[in-house]
Amino acid sequence: MNEIAPIPLNQSKFPEKTAFHRLELGQIMTIYGRMVAAGEWRDYSISMLREVAVFSIFRRAAEHPIYRIEKRPKLAAKQQQYAVIGMDGRILKRGADLRQVLRVLEKKLIRAVD
């Protein structure tokens, strides 16, 4: 019997949704957990769109995000796939290595003691 395999409908170069991989989420959740333990952050959301995956961080659930961690695979050729964006829309850090980009958030955890 001669069976023909079905042809996939989506043959585009990029996937339908951009998502964070398990290792990327592990790095993000490590810093997120430390900031929650410090009482700085309380909630998060994850959005997976066609060209960008966004991890939004909230001080309270009813507010706008105080930080957004974005992954844009199309910018990987320019070595700027990841970005941390502040509440005001400014890019705080951008780069190819997620761990290096997340360091800008770790600085928020270090405070001077009176």
Image (cartoon, rainbow, N blue to C red):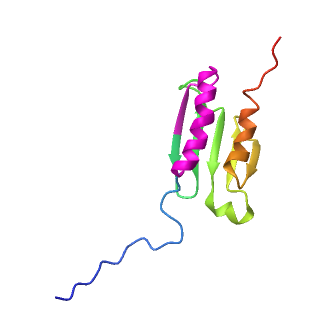
Q: Nearer the viewer, residue 101 or 7?
A: 101
- Give the overall secondary structure of the magenta segment: helix
Q: Position of residue 67 (x, y in %)?
A: 66, 36
Residue 96 appears left or right of 1: right
Q: Position of residue 96 (x, y in %)?
A: 71, 56
* Residue at screen point 58% across, 30% down: 33
Q: Where is residue 19 shown, x and y percent of the image?
A: 52, 53
Please give left or right for residue 109 compared with residue 10 in the image: right
Task: Give me the residue at 57% from left, 37% from top.
Answer: 29
**Quadrant in which residue 27 is drawn:** top right
Is 43 colored magenta in this rendering? yes
Q: Residue at point 62% right, 19% down?
A: 39
Residue situated furthest top in the rendering? 114
Name the residue rendered at 78%, 22% in the picture: 111
**Magenta highlight range:** 20-45
Q: Nearer the viewer, residue 10 or 40?
A: 40
As drawn, the residue found furthest toward the bottom would be 2
Q: Is residue 3 above or below residue 26?
A: below
Residue 84, picture quadrant:
top right
Q: Quadrant of the N terminus?
A: bottom left
Q: Reply yes or no: does residue 38 show up in magenta.
A: yes
Q: Quadrant of the C terminus?
A: top right
Total numbered labels: 0
Q: Position of residue 42 (x, y in %)?
A: 56, 25
Q: Quadrant of residue 64?
A: top right
